[in-house]
Image (tube, grey):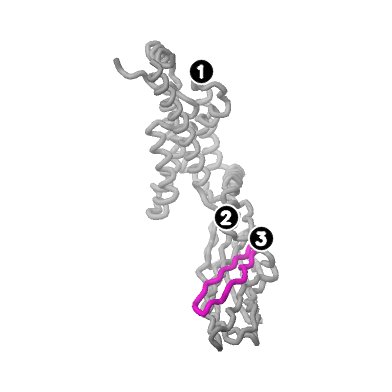
């Protein structure tokens, strides 16, 4: 009798917890149904350049242009990927530190921490975010700068082999925003 | 003697096979089918699956919050009807009213925000994303999926039926 009762109690308890789990999964499934309107651009590749102890900082002007058809409130996030290659002049030179820094509108949002620039390709990433409010059919500009900083005086060169920017626009408009409505330009300072 | 039927517990409507299938379809359709086979059918499938299970999800949440002693629990048909009605009304409103549609977009965006913020913290992005309204396309044609509420009503109605006397006695004996 006692065994039967404990089996019944265990069964009820399992059923109770299964019901809770099913409720939780259904809640998550319901909340995760729709995503926000996001338009992501193809990566915009920047030109290759070289840094050294003589040129420890390179700044690029980055302009992100939105031309929405309707009034738009959006948050813009910019992902940066950089592949660097360190070539020491002498064997045993200290490995330099390299970092990316967003200034201007994206200042302080997220800078990649300085990392060792190993004598092999190393990928660095940085991300910045900014909120913009744009008027319909007017060019809406976000002007900012991306700094490439070498924290070292070690003899040798750091080749910025590849670097690219990908812009994601999360907007509150019920309409789609095509990639054509977002533009990026990069210019040397 | 046939086995005694299980007594309903708070939220147990979600364990009905039809509702489990609806939840699985909703998740699969939104995250797999729509991306692989975007079409009119996948657009409507989420509405059908959502309408079939959402009233019982609401009812289950209500039962969890309002039930103190699960031993004497008996699901309420009044609550079931209210949940079916509320689901049907809200679903219809967001398809025909821009204001209601915006309320839905921002409300769901707000519910999603903690997960986005937590992900940003976990992945060390260094910034917390703002609340972002979700996509929603108001489409009167979606009202054609309203009959899917019948699934919730049917499953819920049977669950709310009082147990036959013999089954009650069998459960009482087993519990004792």
- Residue A106 within the magenta-colored segment of the rendering: no
Image disc number at residue B160: none
Compared with A148, A36 (above or below) is: above
B47 to A78, vertically: above or below: above
Instruction: Judge left or right: residue A81 versus residue B41.
Output: right
For mark 2, what is the residue? B122
| Residue A142 point in image, percent of width and height | 66, 68
Judged by depth in the image, the label closer to the viewer, 1 or 3, is 1
The answer to whether mark 1 and mark 3 are in CB contact below 8 A is no
Residue A45 in sight: no
Label 2 neighbourhood size at 10 Å, few (<14), some (14-19), many (20+)? few
Number of labelled discs? 3
At 59% from the left and 72% from the top, the residue drawn is A115
**Mark 2 vs mark 1: which is more N-terminal?**
1
Q: Distance between the residues labelled 2 and 3?
A: 22 Å
To the question of a shared chain for discs 2 and 3, the answer is no
- Write down the region rendered in magenta: A110-133
The residue to which callout 1 is attached is B72
Q: Could one spot residue A61 in this view of the protein?
A: yes
Mark 1 residue element: helix
Residue at mark 2 to residue at mark 1: CA–CA distance: 43 Å
Residue under numbered circle 3: A131
Q: In this view, does B3 lie to the left or right of A81?
A: left
Q: Residues within 10 Å of mark 1 (few under 14, many from 20)?
A: few
Secondary structure beneath label 3: strand
């Amino acid at each position: 009798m006692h065994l039967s009762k404990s089996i019944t109690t265990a069964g009820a308890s399992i059923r109770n917890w299964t019901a809770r789990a099913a409720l939780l999964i259904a809640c998550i499934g319901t909340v995760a149904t729709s995503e926000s309107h996001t338009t992501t651009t193809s990566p915009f590749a920047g030109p290759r350049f070289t840094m050294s102890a003589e040129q420890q900082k390179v700044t690029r002007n980055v302009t992100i242009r939105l031309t929405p058809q309707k009034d738009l409130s959006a948050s813009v996030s910019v992902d940066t990927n950089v592949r660097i290659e360190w070539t020491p002049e002498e064997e045993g030179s200290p490995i330099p530190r390299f970092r990316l820094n967003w200034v201007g509108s994206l200042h302080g949002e997220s800078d990649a921490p300085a990392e060792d620039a190993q004598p092999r390709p190393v990928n660095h990433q940085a991300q910045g975010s900014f909120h913009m409010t744009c008027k319909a059919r007017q060019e809406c500009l976000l002007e900012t700068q991306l700094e490439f900083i070498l924290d070292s005086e070690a003899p040798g060169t750091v080749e910025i082999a590849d670097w690219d920017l990908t812009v994601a626009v999360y907007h509150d408009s019920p309409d789609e925003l095509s990639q054509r409505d977002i533009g990026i330009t990069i210019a040397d300072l | 003697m046939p086995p005694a039927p299980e007594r309903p517990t708070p939220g147990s409507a979600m364990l009905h096979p039809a509702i489990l299938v609806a939840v699985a379809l909703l998740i699969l359709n939104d995250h797999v089918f729509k991306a692989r086979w975007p079409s009119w059918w996948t657009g409507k499938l989420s509405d059908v699956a959502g309408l079939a299970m959402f009233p019982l999800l609401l009812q289950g949440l209500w039962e969890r919050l309002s039930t103190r002693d699960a031993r004497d629990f008996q699901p309420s048909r009044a609550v079931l009807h209210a949940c079916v009605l509320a689901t049907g009304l809200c679903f219809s409103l967001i398809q025909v009213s821009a204001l209601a549609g915006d309320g839905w977009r921002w409300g769901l965006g707000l519910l999603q925000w903690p997960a986005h913020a937590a992900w940003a913290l976990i992945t060390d992005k260094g910034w917390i994303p703002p609340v972002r309204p979700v996509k929603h396309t108001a489409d009167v044609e979606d009202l054609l999926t309203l009959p899917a509420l019948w699934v919730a009503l049917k499953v819920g109605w049977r669950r709310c039926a009082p147990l036959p006397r013999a089954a009650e006695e069998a459960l009482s004996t087993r519990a004792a």
